[in-house]
Amino acid sequence: MSPANSDDSSGDPFADAGRPLTRKEIRAREKAITAESGDAVPEQAYESGEELHVGVGAAQRAGSSATASGSGSPRTAAIAAPPAAVPAASAVPEAHIPDAQVPDARPVPAVEVPDAEPVPSAEVPDVPPVPPTIHDPAEHADPAVHGDAAAEVHGAQSEYAPHFAEFADGHHYDVHHDAVAHEPYEEHAPYEQQAVGHQLLAGAENAATVTRPSKKVRRRRRLVALLLTLALFVTATVVGAQFLKPLLGNDKPADYPGPGTGQVKVSVEPGEGPVSVAAKLEDAKVVANADTFVAALSASGGTLSPGEYDFKQEMKNSDAVSVLLNEGQAKVMYFALSAGLRIDESLQAISEGSGLSVAQLKALSDSPKQFGLSSKAKNLEGFLAPGEYRFPLGTTAKDILTKLVKATQDELKAQGVTDAAKQYDVVTVASIVQAEGGQAEYKDVAGAIYNRLKPTNTETNGLIQSDATVTYGLGKKTFHIDEAEKADKSNPYNTYAIKGLPAGPIGSPGKTAIDAAAKPNNNDYLYWVTINLDTKETKFSKTLAEHNGYVEQYNAWCEANPGRCV
């Protein structure tokens, strides 16, 4: 059997080749390997002859395995030997094509091949002898190579003299220059770089391949990363909120469980709103949270009433609301007295709130001695302290009036006024202060009144000259009095005609007015006039001329506000 038709058990059709491969053999070998591995060799490489250059370059780099025996030229053996990484190919006779078919063949410069190190013959497998048989070119021609390609191969063979390689059996085989590309070796470096991953190169089968994760795996990783980020964000938010709660005041409980312990008194002032009352209750630890208490009070629909209330500490919001609204408790007698009310106005208000008759109340008021007042007092005028009051049903009229009078006496005692006669005078001055001035000027008005009462005063000769006292004695309320009314000495409250204090208080002074009358400012004022009835702005002066100028300002305000100064 000829070497071309031998069937090697390895399956490689070129396994028994003991000579250099021809162009067609190299091409067939690459196609076979490419079909197995999937690596595609560019078709233009076959047409340009670059694959021949690769074959030579590979042979040059595989110098250690190029020599088949210890004899022969090292240069020839290095060229003739197949690459170390390529299995031996079966022998296929090369075709000889007439020289005339190769156009313009160019001489190829000699390729410098380094000396190959000899390999012991024991390590080289036996190579069967291959007779130098010359085959018909058409017998083994590749069907894909005809015409110009065949002419190129034959022309290259005829133009350059063949070299011979001597193998172990002593036979000589042709090594054709057509295995070398027409261009210099250095110009084909790009092809070598392109063929790095090709199976024909030594060590390509050992290259490590890194497989990229699938899209499903990458999506799963991204989802896990997103969930971890979200979990960290939520955790940081919760932890941060716990630290910020004490700073923002959000760590307070919404309500106490109740029912509470102990007893706490909390007062609600006239005109005080739910927010202010709720703050008081929270400060006294009656309720846990002022905001939730306000919401509970608003939901109840109830309204606040001034007064003093008894609470327990740590009560439920609903229970505290019930206390403020008197829910679940017995009804009480309730009334409110404003500062500046005259005695008949006060008695009327008490009657309406308690259900007691005005006559019963007036009878008690006209006997002031039983309440500890001075003998100069004709009734309880000026001693019924303003404020909000609640009394249990059935409370007597005397008990009610006693409590009101006692509140005024306690305030006088607190200011150091303990004598009953002195108390009566202070309350009288305080009632004028309450009627004549604004709260900001109470102490200056009181000081001016006391200046007028001094015996050494020659400017006013001991006359207080208060319009409020005159109108009280006349039994009317107005800001204007005429000259005849000022000259009427029959009016015991006419301080224009009668020196000193009037017959008694002209109304119920509040705590501030009582304190001012008990401890007035030390000044030199003798005159005062309120120039604005809305703001109670009061002007003070030491002379009558200066005072008359302020009176003109008052008249101008009255003209600008018709109906207000009647």
Image (spheres, rainbow, N blue to C red):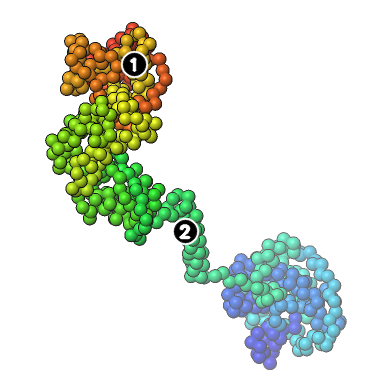
Q: Amino acid at mark 2?
A: Val
Left or right: 71, with 298 as reference point: right
- Give the quarter of the figure containing the C terminus: top left
Q: Residue at x 67, y 69 (%)?
A: 196
Residue beneath disc 2: 238
Instruction: Identify the secondary structure beneath mark 1.
Output: loop
Residue 168: x and y, percent? 82, 86
Mark earlier in primary sequence (2, 1): 2
**Residue drawn 37% across and 46% down?**
279
Give percent across and percent down for residue 264.
36, 50
Q: Quadrant of residue 102?
A: bottom right
In the depicted structure, whether residue 206 falls above or below residue 245: below
* Of residues 55 and 195, the one drawn nearer to the viewer in this rendering: 195
Which residue is nearer to you in this view: 32 or 267? 267
Instruction: Determine whether 104 is above or below 24 in the image.
Output: above
**Residue at (66, 68) in percent of width and height:** 195
Amino acid identity at mark 1: Leu
| Residue beneath disc 1 | 453
* Residue at x-position 23% and y-position 32%: 368
Percent of width and height locating residue 83: 73, 76
Is residue 508 toward the left or the right of residue 122 in the image?
left
Question: Looking at the picture, how far across and down is residue 111, in whole percent?
Answer: 79, 67
